[in-house]
Image (spheres, rainbow, N blue to C red):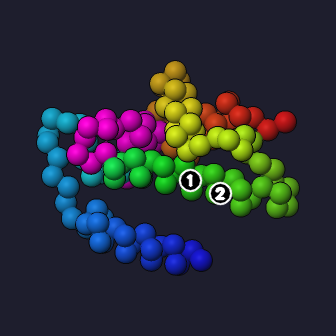
């Protein structure tokens, strides 16, 4: 299944021109294609808060939501296997948009975590909002 997901992502990326074509960005808008390679939570915050009016908003928000989707799938995959428990206990009604908003609010209030690994801060934020009992 993993290989089929990778092939699907590559096919969609090639067709859309997103993965292999350079994205011309203005030097003044603060965003570059390199922003989609996040090395820390601050960089993920930049991608997830790109203005909707930006010409590359769709690519950035898709990357952001995909990052969160992957993190939640990881939590689901390890939960209940061996000694592992759920990391986050989101309500059934929670959406990706809400999860991203929780992360954005958390990191803006705790900017000392900006240089931390992004997935670590995502879980830190989500656990603060939706802890498991």
Q: Is residue 87 magenta?
A: no
Region in magenta = 37-57
Reply above or below: 48 against 34. Answer: above
Query: Does the magenta segment cover residue 41?
Result: yes
Picture quadrant where residue 84 is located? bottom right
The foreground one among 111 and 18 is: 18
Relative to 122, is 58 above or below?
below
- The residue depicted at 71 percent of the width and 44 percent of the height is 92
For image coordinates 17% across by 47% down, the residue present is 25
Above or below, 44 relative to 62: above
Expressed as whole percent of the image width and height from the top left, the position of residue 43 reads 39, 40
Which type of secondary structure does the marked residue at label 1 adopt? helix
Q: Which residue is mark 1?
A: 69
Q: Which residue is mark 2?
A: 74
Left or right side of 31 for 126: right
Task: Say which quadrant the N terminus sits in.
Answer: bottom right
Q: Is residue 79 left or right of residue 59?
A: right
Q: Is residue 118 above or below residue 11?
A: above
Q: Position of residue 5 (x, y in %)?
A: 51, 72
Q: Secondary structure at mark 2?
A: helix
Q: Position of residue 3 (x, y in %)?
A: 53, 78
Task: First in sequence, mark 1 or 2: give its number.
Answer: 1
């Amino acid at each position: 299944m993993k290989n089929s997901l990778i092939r699907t992502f590559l096919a969609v990326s090639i067709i859309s021109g997103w993965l292999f074509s350079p994205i011309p960005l203005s030097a003044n808008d603060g965003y570059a294609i390199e922003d989609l390679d996040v090395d820390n939570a601050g960089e993920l915050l930049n991608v997830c808060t790109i203005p909707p009016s930006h010409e590359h908003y769709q690519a950035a928000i898709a990357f952001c939501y995909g990052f969160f989707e992957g993190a939640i799938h990881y939590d689901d995959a390890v939960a209940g296997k061996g000694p592992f428990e759920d990391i986050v206990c989101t309500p059934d009604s929670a959406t990706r948009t809400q999860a991203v908003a929780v992360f954005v609010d958390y990191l803006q209030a705790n900017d000392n975590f900006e240089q931390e690994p992004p997935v670590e801060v995502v879980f830190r934020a989500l656990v603060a909002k939706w802890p498991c009992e």
